[in-house]
Image (cartoon, rainbow, N blue to C red):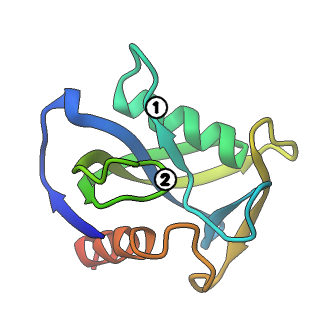
Amino acid sequence: MQVKFYETAPDELLKFAVIIAKYQGKWIFCKHRDRDTYEIPGGHREEGETILDAAKRELREETGALDFTVERVCVYSVTGKNRVNETGEETFGMLYYAEIKALDRELHSEIERVMMFDALPDRWTYPLIQPRLIEEYQRRNK
């Protein structure tokens, strides 16, 4: 699995939005109802949606975020087969950071629950991708 980072990419290449988020100083992770691992909020961009709108929608759906700010971090790409990429070709997404100010108590998505951590978790849904995204965010924001 290869993860690369870019400053920009053509808009039509951006298929995913991933949002590193914090609430009250804690890392926010999602636990999907079909898995026993943790993941960063995010998902596929829908038809006619801007990549920023996709990020905001995914953040709301997966975390219950009601009030938040979102900022662009960078473009990322993943090359290699995984659960969402059966061909293994290079796919592109936009990485965001969100500061969540208020959360809904009820979720309306495939996410079973939202977890808050002081430190990063051990059991990742995408262990070869997600830790790299957080490392890049931290590198850029030191």
Q: Viewer-proximal residue, 62 or 116?
A: 62
What's under tag 2, amino acid-wise? Ala
- Front tag of 2 and 1: 1
Q: Residue furthest top?
A: 48
What's under tag 1, amino acid-wise? Ala
User: Where residue 91 appears, x then y in whole percent?
Assistant: 27, 46
Relative to 86, say whether 44 is above or below: above
Residue at image point 75% right, 70% down: 36
Q: How many marks?
A: 2
Proximity of marks 2 and 1: CB atoms separated by less than 8 Å? no
The residue indicated by pointer 1 is 54
Quadrant (top left/top right/bottom left/bottom right) for the N terminus: bottom left
Q: Earlier in the sequence, mark 2 or mark 1?
A: 1
Q: Residue furthest front?
A: 87
Q: Is residue 52 left or right of residue 127?
A: left
The residue indicated by pointer 2 is 98
Q: Which mark is residue 39?
A: none
User: Where residue 82 appears, x then y in whole percent?
Assistant: 43, 59
User: Where residue 60 appears, x then y in whole percent?
Assistant: 64, 38
Residue at image point 41% right, 43% down: 17
Q: CA distance from mark 2 to mark 1?
A: 13 Å
In terms of secondary structure, where does tag 2 sit? strand
Circle 2 packing at 10 Å, graded few (<14), some (14-19), many (20+), is many
Figure quadrant of residue 80: bottom left
